[in-house]
Amino acid sequence: MKKSAFVRGVETALVGVLLLFALVPIYWMATSALKSDVELGRLDPSWFPESATLDQFRAAIGQSRILSYLLYSGLLAAGTAVVVVILGSLAAYAVTQWTFPGVGGFLGVTLFTQLLPQSAVLVPLYLAWKTLGLTGTLPGLGVAYVFLFLPVGVWMLVGFFQSLPKELTEAGLIDGAGRLRILFSIVLPVVRPALGAVAVYTVISCWGEFLFALVFLRSDHATSTVALASLVGEHNPNIGPLMAAATLVTLPPLIVFFLMQRQFIAGLTGGSSK
């Protein structure tokens, strides 16, 4: 049924309001990072910097070692995304292509883990990591991130793997290919949009995670989100350096999303429609 002009106008207006709601804070953050301390301290704030300056960025880099923390966050996000994509692909392939007892229960337990808040699993996981000697290290936090984000990756991939025709794998078996060869040579090239969607989701989720990074890492190996919190003082809010650091922290996930937005959208819509 064709939508009327009024309905289309209402939908356009709602989308515009949502865009303003999402983009205005980002714009305010970026412009505040370009203002001087005098301009930031005024009671009547301006929408545009009167004289743009990079002093706030210099202060943020000098006060918080934000560049080092950005590197730590990037290594964690990239490493976690690679592991989640590999393990998620293996799990989704096994669940959808093979029949074994408990397959339904496996998917149910995987979904149930996402119903638990992070604070509920933080203490037992921290105690286990402390016993294993993994606390205070980037690899230890990376393994914790894999446990956190792998279930969602599996569920995102299951929809794609279920849509694959059985003829693909059967043709590979007839040609004498093993299960792993079929997975890496036939199945994964077909589901590349889903792999990209899982990778983007994992990178953005790891980049913005705060609670586990705060608890599991030492202060000298903190992530960018923890570094932002350290810029907020009790008596001095450090608005300028905070806005500059927040701008630097926001740019990498935005760049990743814009570079892979087609794969991300195709992965989400393809999995839901199939």
Image (cartoon, rainbow, N blue to C red):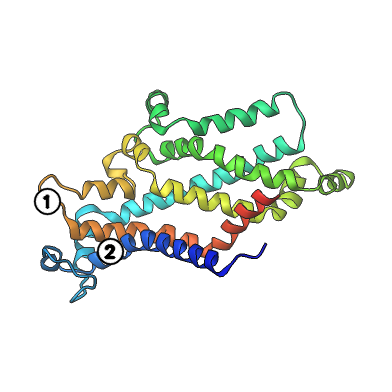
Q: Going by the image, does 29 lie left or right of 177?
A: left
Residue farthest along the right direction in this orientation: 174
Task: Name the residue at 50% across, 62% down.
Answer: 11
* Label 2, residues with CA under 10 Å away: few <14, some 14-19, many ≥20: some
- Residue 41's image quarter? bottom left
21, 125: nearer the viewer: 21
In this view, 109 is above or below 255: above
Residue 76 makes an appearance in the image: no
Task: Name the residue at 59% across, 67% down.
Answer: 4
Number of numbered discs on residues: 2
Tell me which numbered mark, 1 or 2, is placed earlier along the sequence.
2
Residue type at tag 1 = Asn
- The percent coordinates of residue 147 (x first, y second) are 50, 35
Name the residue tied to disc 1: 236
Between label 1 and label 2, give the one nearer the viewer: 2
Q: Going by the image, does 115 lie left or right of 2?
A: left
Residue type at tag 2 = Trp
- The percent coordinates of residue 111 (x first, y second) are 57, 33
Q: Secondary structure at mark 1?
A: loop
- Residue 100's image quarter? top right
- The percent coordinates of residue 201 (x first, y second) are 51, 50
Name the residue tied to disc 2: 28
Disc 1 from disc 2: Cα separation: 20 Å
- The percent coordinates of residue 257 (x first, y second) are 49, 60
Q: Secondary structure at mark 2?
A: helix
